[in-house]
Amino acid sequence: MGALDRNIWIFQWNPLYWPAGEGLALLDAGEISILELMDSWYCPKHKDEVRTGDIALLWRTKGKPPNESLWGIVAAGVVSGELFEGDGEGRFPGPFVPLSLTVDMRDEPLLRADLLHEPSFARAPIVTRPLGTVFRVSPEQWEAVKATAAPDVRSALIALESATPSGP
């Protein structure tokens, strides 16, 4: 099953606001990877469309210092389960989707500035209307992401799209 047989989403991450506390400090110190830090994502929008097996791209925005040069895709993986409700303890109440991020791209991120050279991606909602946490990626934008990626990252993204999704 290929990527076009399922949805592709960008989940926007602002490290100034989430995750708070020890997790981000451990990440900054190199004691854990981004793949260990992110196991689910707040999903108030598109919650009826996000499905197990969909491709997930983690988009970093802001950061320390707030600097647009850091914005872009820093990890990729899949939605690994069904939507669930946060309990208000450790997570704020609301809908979340579990993520299995398997491609850590922080050493070779797909930066916003580079992706903007691809005309289809320049029209992506994460670029034109970046308020929110979840954004649909069109097939053309997905092709732009792969075209912009370094060869090893591109291979990992292609492997994601050819993996058989689990779930309904």
Image (cartoon, rainbow, N blue to C red):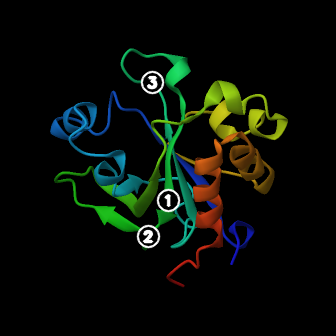
**For mark 2, what is the residue?**
80
**Residue 158, above or below 140:** below
**Amino acid beneath label 1:** Gly
Q: How many marks?
A: 3
**Amino acid beneath label 3:** Lys
Residue 73 appears in the picture as rendered: yes
Q: Find residue 73 and report its horizontal and vertical position in percent.
A: 55, 40
Q: Find residue 74 and report its horizontal and vertical position in percent.
A: 49, 40
| Res. 110 mark | none
Nearer mark to the viewer, of 1 and 3: 1
CB within 8 Å, label 1 to label 2: yes
**Residue at disc 1, secondary structure:** strand
Closer to the camera in the image, 116 or 82: 116
**For mark 1, what is the residue?**
77
**For mark 3, what is the residue?**
62
Crowding around mark 2 (Cα neighbors within 10 Å: few <14, some 14 to 19, many 20+) is many
